[in-house]
Image (cartoon, grey):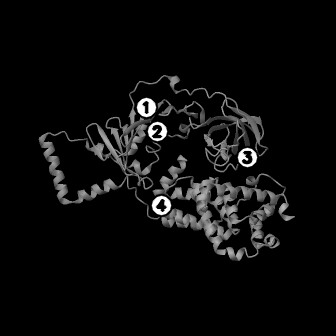
Amino acid sequence: MFEEKLLVWKFNRGNRDVVRGIYEKYKNDLVTLAAALLSDVSSAEDVVHDVFVSFIKSSPKFRLTGSLKGYLATCVANSARNRNRAGKRRRYIALDEAAEVEDCSNGAELSAIFGEELRQLTWALEQLPYEQREVLLLRSYSGLRFKTIGESQGVSENTARGRYRYATDKLRSMLNGEARK
Amino acid sequence: MRPTDNINQLIKKLQLKASANLDGRVHDDIDRALATPQKSESADAKPNRWRIIMKSRIVKLAAAAAIVIAVLLGVNFVGRPNMANVAWAKVTERASEVDYVHMYYFKSRGNDFARHFEAWYANGKMVMRGNKGDAHYDDGRMSLGFDEHGMLTVREPSKFTAGQPVLELFTGGLLSAKNEQFNQQVPASVGDDFLIYSFDPSPRESDWMRGIFITVGKNSLLPVQVKVCHKDSDYDLIVFDYEAAKEPAEFFGPPDVGQPNGRGEVAVDGEEVEVAIADAPGLKTAILRLRSRPSGDTDKASFYLDVTFITDEGYRSGTNEHLGMKVDEAGQCGTGSAEGGLDKWPDGKYRNIRFSPWLRPAGKENTYIVEIRCRLETQED
């Protein structure tokens, strides 16, 4: 934690190498998180780019209360959520028809993004309600506390915890083949 | 893909790399945004103001006249001129050479003025004692922390191995030799015996801090007092004593860590393991589960540990999930009821479980011994 405080201190003083170091350290995890949320690499990279532009602009008044990775992951999730809302109606028009969801382009795209080996996982992730998927991914990739995730989603810690539990249960169930029966 | 229970492990297999295009865009933005270096308000502001003032012809004349008068009257000119140019870097350099120091940390809050903690450092070993009875030992190899009940709470590599000087450690990084802006700062005032360095708060602390004032011995160039002034009348005061009697060697030796309350062999990504808890009134069992974790930015194997407790009454605590663990290190944790509060147990009573897991090698591949030190605190505690 001290190291991060030092990084932030230098960041607030415009140390270019530190900003580059922060980007290099977290870029892959953040792109992965955004891609898993948005099912689109191009949009994911746009989100990460936007988050870093805002982050750079926040210097020299940036204040860190938790972990830096957690902060950046939350920013990515917020930005991805906004993009997702914009395209939600169009993308999930056939949400109530399981067969159509299974074959929807987003699922196919996620498989293409992450590789055929993880095809079933990406398919299962696609089936989760967005809020549950977000909690699961934020928890897995950034180790954020449920309280922080809840604050980011505007819900209580218990709701975030519940979403995580539902998400893991559903995912487990789907990966065991039950959802496709 | 075969059915699996380990969802998190699977999810972490999803890994993408940022494209060269994104790298280029972000690096360009960094270059653009930081093209004009921001000056430190701490290090540069005062000399600049001084230069501006000295540009005034009247001020120059007045200063010259003052010097002439002082010399004519035989007044002992306060401070040798060169001492006014002693950069803060000289102080941190000198401080890093210290082989013994006793430090007192006080807090003034309203009408209360109390010791927060004391620390001693001698030849690479350090002891810190908090006002609640907690203590921290660092022998240059490992750092051990104990709570007020003597329970081991922290075990991690020494802070000194990373080259952090003791005064930097004591002041939470304030006296860091890496602090480039502070390093160039010169004294705000020069007295007969002391130099006073004045630092403005960083933007991050500016909402509550007014400034940091450090008194440095003029001859020794060692800090003797650090005063952190808040915007209200509160302040923190750190006093350094270099001439106190040296403590004996055993003073710096940590106490015996004692036996754990529970101990179990746990396989990475294996089944959860139930461990019987002894000598921790109110607690009967700990349920442990160890998960693999990408090594990421650390070269040491690290894992996630999930811990749940069962009380004597059979109540289940909340699960502390994803506790980051490294081999041969211990950390401090706490948990309440499964409902998420300290008083939301089935009988409505208050229970706070404090515990410290320690991951030790078991001599087997992918298996570790998890030692649990724990204590259940009730409302009375």
- Circle 4 residue: A59
- Callout 2–callout 4 Cβ contact below 8 Å: no
A171 horizontally vs A18: left or right: right
The verdict on a common chain for dots 3 and 1 is yes
3 or 1: mark nearer the eye: 3
Residue at image location 62% in from the left, 63% down from the top: A77
Secondary structure beneath label 3: strand
Q: Mark 4 lies on which chain?
A: A
**Residue A145 or B27: which is nearer the viewer?**
A145
Q: Which chain carries label 1?
A: B
Across and down, in percent, residue B62 comes to 16, 53
The verdict on a common chain for dots 2 and 3 is yes
The verdict on a common chain for dots 2 and 1 is yes
- Callout 3–callout 1 Cβ contact below 8 Å: no
Where, by quadrant of the figure, is residue B323 drawn? Answer: top right
Which corner quadrant holds the N terminus of chain B? bottom right
- Callout 2–callout 1 Cβ contact below 8 Å: yes
Pointer 3: residues within 10 angstroms few (<14), some, or many (20+)? many
- Circle 3 residue: B291
Secondary structure beneath label 2: helix
**Is residue B11 at least partly visible in the picture?**
no
The verdict on a common chain for dots 1 and 4 is no
B153 horizontally vs B38: left or right: right
- Circle 2 residue: B170
Q: What residue type is labelled 2?
A: Phe
- Circle 1 residue: B101
2 or 3: mark nearer the eye: 3
Gap in Å between the C-alphas at discs 2 and 4?
Answer: 27 Å
Gap in Å between the C-alphas at discs 1 and 4?
Answer: 37 Å
- Height in image: B214 above or below B46? above
